[in-house]
Each structure stands twice: as structure tokens, then as C-alpha cells.
């Protein structure tokens, strides 16, 4: 196809072959605008860039993979739909959080058909793993609200290492995967740059709510209230008196969602990949890294991250 009549997809494919590439023990990683992606993600990201039109009331849930996307999706869905359901008949007791809120960069079909999000009722809640600098331009122009969640990089690494085995069937040696993580070469990496971009913007702008997994685990009710206010649907005094925030925290807890029958037996389609729903519920703990990486590895990663975040005000 000629450059003049190429589709967004073929344009992306042409461009991808010219980008810097790193071989890895699994699939090659491609550097696109300072972030690394494997090809199947990058093709969709370029397609999204070319086709997605944000609406001013869209709410974007942005996360680095394995930092609490599933939890944030469940909470946001439960908060914004709380007048429609009670906890006995709630959709989250039958549907996976990944099914109620789409991750646009992962799920956009390769024909570019955005019908899967066009049909959502406003305000649309859309998730993405994209770094801030790679979000489609219209999200910034429209001034959409963004919720970002990040996590201790050591736990994010361990969670990711387990997940790629379910998602891609990759069984990379943990030491090799760790070195790639420390170099920043992994999908949507470098990890710290992803966090820093959202952090810096959140300091300047109240259109970004910056959350940390560990803080939310410590005080979930407090953060559910913060999230509800940010989403434009704060809890009323009566709801608080009736314990609605606590009820939603229970509904969206790791214990409840991982115990849902379909979460244990079914699969979910994520773009071109089909993955077990249970892969999204591993341990749900803070500090599980101690069971998988050595103190020495932990120190090395902490040192790298500390250096990268120096002066930013962001600490893990
Ligand atoms: P672990 O692998 O450490 O257990 P994501 O949803 O971004 O893919 O992140 C997955 C991580 O969040 C996994 O971490 C998973 O167990 C944890 N998780 C999933 N649902 C959760 C929930 N409702 N509450 C807290 N953590 C949850």
C-alpha cells in the first residue's frame, strides 16, 4: 500500500519497523517515544492514537500494569453505579472487573473499530496502561479527569513476572526478568518514568488523582471516599451513615472478587489474548516481593528507583 492511502494500522506497521528494538528472552521490545512495548501492544497503541476521540466527561483510569488496575476498575464501577445495584445482585459478583471497564490500548481491535467504547453511556470510564505522554492528544485537549495508581516497584515487578506467564505463557528466569525491569526494558517501561509523568502532572493539576496501592490497602474506606468525590459522585451524609463506602470496599476487596465463582473458572478476552480470570487475582498483598526476590535485588531496585525519582517528591 502506498503512504497516501495507508490505513492507521499499516502506517503503524511501517513505522514500527524503523524504531529501535531490543531482543529479550521473550519477544523483542520496541522503543516508541521513550517507552518500551512489544509489537502487539504497539500496533494497538498507534491505532488508538490515530482513531480515539475523547469526550470532555470521559474518566481515564491510568495504571502501570500490575499496580491495581483490576481493583481500581472494580471500585470506580461500583462507586459510579451504586444507585443501580445492591451488593446482593451486583454485576461484579458475576462479571470480572476487566469486563466492566475496557482497557482501551489493549482492547482496541486491529480494524480500529471503536464501537466497544462508543456505545458506553456517559460519563465513560476508560482504562489505559499508556504513559501520560502517549495518551491520545484529545484526552489532554478535552481536559479529561485521570486517576492514576502506582505501586512499590518491587511488588509491581513480582506481580508482572507472574502475570506474563499466564498472559503470554512466558517463563523467563526471574533474575533475567529482574535485570530487564531494572533497565526499564519491559512493556510500558521504564516503570519509574511512567509513574513520574503522572506524578509531576498531578502536582500541577487537579485533573489527576494520584493514588498508591499501599496507601489504599491501608485505608481503603478513606480512598473510596476520595475516589468518589473525584469521580464527581461523592457519598452523601446518609450514605456514609448507612455504611455504603464500607460496603463498596468489601464488594471490591481481593477476598470478595477473587472468590467470585466465574473468577476461578472462566477466561477473559484481552485484545488478541485470552487469559484466565484468576490471573488477575494472585495474592493481593503489600510486600509479597520478599517471597520472590533477594534482599540484594531489592536494594538494587530501590537504589535505581530512588535515583530516578530524586527531587520529584515521589517516594515509594
Ligand atoms: P499480586 O500479583 O501482587 O497479587 P492489575 O489489576 O493492575 O493487573 O494488578 C494485579 C495485582 O493487583 C495483583 O497483585 C492482584 O492480586 C492485585 N489485586 C487484584 N484485585 C485486587 C483487589 N480487589 N484488591 C487488592 N489487590 C488486588
Image (cartoon, rainbow, N blue to C red):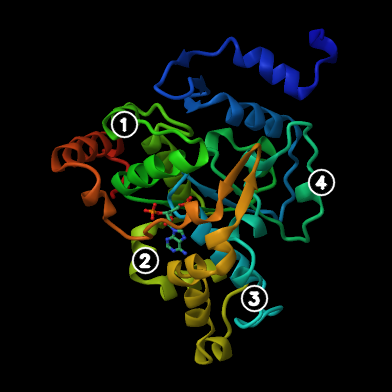
Pointer 3 or 2: first along the chain: 3
Q: In the image, residue 113 lies at what x, y percent?
A: 80, 38
Task: Write down which quadrant ligand 1 falls in.
Answer: bottom left
Which element is circle 1 on?
loop
**Residue found at the far right of this picture:** 5
Contact check, label 3 and label 2, Cβ < 8 Å: no
Does mark 2 have its CB less than 8 Å from ligand 1? yes
Cα distance in 3D space between marks 4 and 1: 40 Å
Disc 4 marks which residue? Answer: 115
Pointer 4 or 3: first along the chain: 3
Pointer 2 or 4: first along the chain: 4
Disc 1 marks which residue? Answer: 173
- Image label count: 4
Residue 207: image quadrant is bottom right
Residue 230 in sight = no
Position of 148 with respect to 99 (left or right) is left
Q: In the image, residue 208 lies at what x, y percent?
A: 52, 53
Position of 263 with respect to 219 (left or right) is right
The residue mark sitting in front, 3 or 1, is: 1
Disc 3 marks which residue? Answer: 90
Cα distance in 3D space between marks 2 and 4: 35 Å
Pointer 4 or 1: first along the chain: 4
41 or 31, which is in the foreground? 41
19 or 29, which is in the foreground? 29
Position of 150 with respect to 316 (left or right) is right
Residue 305: image quadrant is top left
The residue mark sitting in front, 3 or 2, is: 3
Does mark 3 have its CB less than 8 Å from ligand 1? no
Disc 2 marks which residue? Answer: 217
The residue mark sitting in front, 4 or 1, is: 1
Which element is circle 2 on?
helix
**Residue found at the far front of this picture:** 265
Amino acid at each position: 500500500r502506498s503512504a497516501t492511502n495507508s490505513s492507521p494500522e499499516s502506517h503503524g506497521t511501517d513505522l514500527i519497523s524503523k524504531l529501535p528494538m531490543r531482543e529479550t528472552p521473550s519477544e523483542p521490545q520496541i522503543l516508541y517515544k521513550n517507552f518500551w512495548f512489544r509489537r502487539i501492544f504497539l500496533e494497538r497503541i498507534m491505532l488508538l492514537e490515530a482513531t480515539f476521540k475523547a469526550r470532555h466527561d470521559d474518566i481515564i483510569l491510568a495504571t502501570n500494569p500490575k499496580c491495581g488496575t483490576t481493583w481500581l476498575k472494580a471500585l470506580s464501577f461500583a462507586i459510579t453505579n451504586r444507585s443501580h445495584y445492591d451488593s446482593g445482585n451486583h454485576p461484579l459478583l458475576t462479571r470480572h472487573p476487566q469486563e466492566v471497564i475496557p482497557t482501551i490500548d489493549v482492547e482496541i481491535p486491529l480494524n480500529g473499530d471503536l464501537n466497544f467504547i462508543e456505545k458506553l453511556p456517559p460519563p465513560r470510564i476508560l482504562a489505559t496502561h499508556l504513559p501520560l505522554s502517549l495518551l491520545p492528544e484529545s484526552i489532554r485537549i478535552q481536559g479529561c479527569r485521570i486517576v492514576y495508581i502506582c505501586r512499590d516497584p518491587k511488588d509491581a515487578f513480582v506481580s508482572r513476572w507472574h502475570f506474563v506467564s499466564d498472559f503470554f505463557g512466558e517463563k523467563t528466569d526471574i533474575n533475567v526478568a529482574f535485570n530487564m525491569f531494572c533497565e526499564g526494558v519491559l512493556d510500558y517501561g521504564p516503570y519509574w518514568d511512567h509513574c513520574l509523568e503522572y506524578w509531576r502532572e498531578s502536582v500541577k493539576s487537579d485533573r489527576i488523582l494520584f493514588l498508591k496501592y499501599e496507601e489504599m490497602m491501608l485505608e481503603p474506606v478513606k480512598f473510596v471516599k476520595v475516589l468518589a468525590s473525584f469521580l464527581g459522585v461523592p457519598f452523601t451524609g446518609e450514605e456514609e451513615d448507612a455504611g455504603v463506602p464500607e460496603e463498596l470496599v468489601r464488594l471490591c476487596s481481593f477476598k470478595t472478587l477473587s472468590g467470585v465463582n466465574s473468577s476461578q473458572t472462566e477466561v477473559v478476552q484481552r485484545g488478541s489474548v485470552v487469559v484466565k480470570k484468576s490471573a488477575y487475582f494472585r495474592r493481593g498483598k503489600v510486600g509479597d516481593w520478599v517471597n520472590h526476590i533477594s534482599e540484594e535485588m531489592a536494594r538494587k531496585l530501590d537504589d535505581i528507583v530512588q535515583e530516578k525519582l530524586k527531587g520529584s517528591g515521589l517516594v515509594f
